[in-house]
Image (cartoon, rainbow, N blue to C red):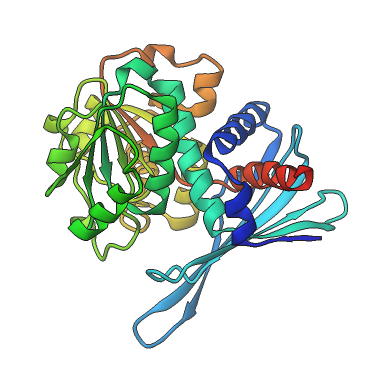
Amino acid sequence: MIYIDEKTTAKYLNITNCVKSIQKMYKIMQTKDYAMGGKNANSHGMRISIPRDKHTNNTFIAMPGFLGGEYQVAGLKWHGPNIRGTTNYTLILNKPNTGAPIAFFEANLLTSYRTAALSLYVTTLLKQAQTINKVGLIGGGEIHTIFLQGLLELYPNINLIKIKSKTESGAKKFISYFKKFKFRFEICKNVNAVLDDSDLISVNPGFDFDSLSQMPLLRTKYLKENVLVLCLSYAKFSDEFLINGAIKVADNFAMYESYLAEFGYPVYPKFSSLGSRFIDLVYDRRVKPGEIVDIVDILNNTKNEILTKNKPIVFASGGMITEDIAVACDLLKEIKIK
């Protein structure tokens, strides 16, 4: 068994290759040659909660899965304690017929890269290069740093990046990574300024909110007609907008159906990702399941009548073990070659 630490991952991993891994993963998911946890084989993962002190629990999440196609690998990612600033990820890959371990990864950086790569892949499916000039980022941090690095390679017409971070110092630190580029940065004091006139918006303020009221509210009146909004973590929209005003796209809607079975209705107050709101609206019969567009639907050229409407597109990203397996396997191959 091979042990891959974060230093090795940083040396060999690059965002362009990660996007290719995500693309290959979805082509395999198109054929249904994959499995995740849960009754519907599409669960994000299983949770355990351990008392940390009188007021706080440590939460660990295990994400088992299998990815077929060219990979034919089983895997398990395990992360915790999911307390602000303390979470660590590990990933093990196994041979599916014997269970023999193939490799063990320290997977913090790998997780950031695969999350950014998914957003980039989805962007290439939904936005042509010449249509993105202004980008809005809600949240700084590692994932958005990697995402923007990849975005600038794919979309050379970008001339303005607007960012709203938790602190101004955080925004300035984020900007410092991009000094060699000639486009303009704008630090925004509120979410509305980020949204206003942006062609692409990525929302990743994290998961550390005590209540729904603390989460960033994305107001419809500030969104351009054909904007793409990528929601990587917690985000909030009006129900009226989600029901009637938006094209709703999901990484894997079956995963959110699994959330409903695991968390019970309503899901969104318990785990406030955009996909959770999608499934609650479907449960309420305010949105039909067929109105949700999966990435696989796009690859199958179905639901084109939805995608061609002149409306904002909102994308729900929840994180899947299949992403980790694809990126890790290709990384392992790269390490062995070099």
Q: Is residue 265 above or below residue 208?
A: above
Q: Quadrant of the N terminus?
A: bottom right
- Taking 209 as reference, is 31 left or right? right
Residue found at x 36% / y 54% = 141
Tell me if I can see residue 143 in this picture: yes
Instruction: Tell which residue pokes out farthest to the right in this image.
Output: 98
Along the line of sight, the residue nearer the viewer: 191 or 288:
191
Residue found at x 69% / y 41% = 330
- Taking 80 as reference, is 213 left or right? left
Find residue 160 and report its horizontal and vertical position in percent. 23, 32
Find residue 35 and report its horizontal and vertical position in percent. 67, 43
Q: Give the total number of marks visible in the rendering.
A: 0
Q: Is residue 128 above or below residue 116?
A: above
Find residue 183 and report its horizontal and vertical position in percent. 26, 32
Along the line of sight, the residue nearer the viewer: 136 or 83:
136
Find residue 221 and report its horizontal and vertical position in percent. 11, 30
Residue found at x 37% / y 49% = 233
Q: Quadrant of the C terminus?
A: top right
Instruction: Tell which residue pokes out farthest to the front in this image.
Output: 180
Q: Is residue 31 above or below residue 237?
A: above
Residue found at x 68% / y 38% = 34
Residue 90: which quarter of the image? bottom right
Tell me if I can see residue 258 in this picture: no
Residue 6: which quarter of the image? bottom right
- Taking 33 as reference, is 232 left or right? left
Instruction: Tell which residue pokes out farthest to the bottom in this image.
Output: 54
- Taking 257 as reference, is 239 left or right? left
